[in-house]
Structures are given as structure tokens and as C-alpha cells.
Image (cartoon, rainbow, N blue to C red):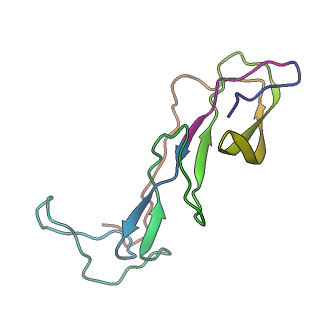
């Protein structure tokens, strides 16, 4: 994968590519409480009340520059593009290429739009990750 470039030929740093890994989820559940030791594997005692389900869920993003893709399989990837402060605003185009034996067999173009401002080095935005209703404990 080449670094995205704008019409003037300016390039952003080369993108980072990660494979989307999966983790097994045994039981669809929201939060549950257990007094068992931390090293015990936890099993809920009541049915789950979330919108999920048991199965394989995408979560880890192990880095991968290149990887083998077995026949008849699907492997999602995650592409991260870092934009340095001071980059020229505008659109930068690049492509993800699938290569077999040195020949490109598929190509997926992408565009990164760079805005004319920079985010601060330190964020002061607060977030609530556990908002519960009136029966919160």
C-alpha cells in the first residue's frame, strides 16, 4: 500500500494496516456481577439483556503489513492513516492492493480528506461509557 497523495503529489505517511481479529463470546450479556476470584472464568447466572449474541466478535487489531489469505476465506482489515500537523488540506488518494505472486489481483481505492485545522495534542472531552437508567446501583 502506497502513502496517500494529493493532486500536487504531496504524500501523507504510509498507512498502518491491521488484521481484524476475533474473540469468542460464550454468552450474550450486559453487565453482571460475580464475587468469585478474579482468576475464575465468569459465567452469568441470568439470561443476557443486550442486543448481542454468542459467537465470534471482532475486537483486536494485530498489525500486519502483509498476510496470507487462504482460498475461500474472508479477512477484514483496518487501515489507519495518520495526518501530520501542517499537512496541506484537501483530498489524498490511495489504494489497498491484493497481490498474488507479485501481480495485483484486486485493488480498492480510498480517499482521505484533510481539513484545514489540527486537533489539539491533549483532549479535554469527557465521555461516559456506562450510562444506566433509573435502576442504577
Horizontally, residue 37 falls left or right of residue 28, namely: left
Q: Residue at x 59, y 55 (%)?
A: 76
User: 124 or 4: which is nearer to us?
Assistant: 4
Horizontally, residue 39 falls left or right of residue 48, namely: left
Q: Is residue 14 magenta?
A: yes
Q: Going by the picture, which residue comes out furthest to the top?
A: 86
Q: Residue at x 51, y 25 (%)?
A: 122
Residue 62 in which image quadrant = top left
Q: Going by the picture, which residue comes out furthest to the front?
A: 101
Residue 85 in which image quadrant = top right
Q: Going by the picture, which residue comes out furthest to the bottom?
A: 47
Q: Estimate the x, y position of residue 63 in percent, counting from the top left.
A: 48, 40
Q: Residue at x 26, y 77 (%)?
A: 44
Q: Residue at x 65, y 23 (%)?
A: 13
Report if residue 133 is visible in the image: no
Q: Main secondary structure of the magenta part?
A: loop
In this rendering, the answer to whether 14 lies above or below 63 is: above
Position of the C terminus, as image quadrant, is bottom left
Q: Estimate the x, y position of residue 30 in percent, counting from the top left.
A: 38, 71
In this rendering, the answer to whether 25 lies above or below 64 is: below
In this rendering, the answer to whether 75 lies above or below 79 is: below
Q: Which residues are magenta?
A: 9-17
Q: Estimate the x, y position of residue 82 in percent, counting from the top left.
A: 62, 29
Callout count: 0
User: 52 or 106: which is nearer to us?
Assistant: 106
Horizontally, residue 47 falls left or right of residue 35, namely: right
Report if residue 4 is visible in the image: yes
Q: Going by the picture, which residue comes out furthest to the right?
A: 7
Q: Is residue 26 magenta?
A: no
Q: Estimate the x, y position of residue 128 in percent, counting from the top left.
A: 46, 51
Amino acid at each position: 500500500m502506497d502513502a496517500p497523495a494529493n493532486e500536487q503529489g504531496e504524500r501523507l505517511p504510509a498507512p498502518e494496516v491491521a488484521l481484524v481479529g476475533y474473540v469468542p463470546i460464550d454468552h450474550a450479556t450486559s453487565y453482571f456481577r460475580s464475587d468469585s476470584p478474579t482468576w475464575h472464568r465468569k459465567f452469568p447466572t441470568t439470561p443476557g439483556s443486550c442486543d448481542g449474541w454468542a459467537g465470534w466478535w471482532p475486537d483486536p487489531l494485530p498489525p500486519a503489513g502483509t498476510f496470507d489469505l487462504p482460498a475461500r476465506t474472508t479477512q477484514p482489515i483496518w487501515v489507519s492513516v495518520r495526518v501530520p500537523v501542517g499537512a496541506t488540506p484537501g483530498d489524498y488518494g490511495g489504494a489497498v492492493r491484493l497481490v498474488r505472486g507479485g501481480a495485483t489481483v484486486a485493488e480498492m481505492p480510498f480517499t482521505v480528506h484533510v481539513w484545514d485545522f489540527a486537533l489539539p495534542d491533549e483532549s479535554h472531552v469527557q465521555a461516559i461509557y456506562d450510562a444506566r437508567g433509573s435502576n442504577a446501583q
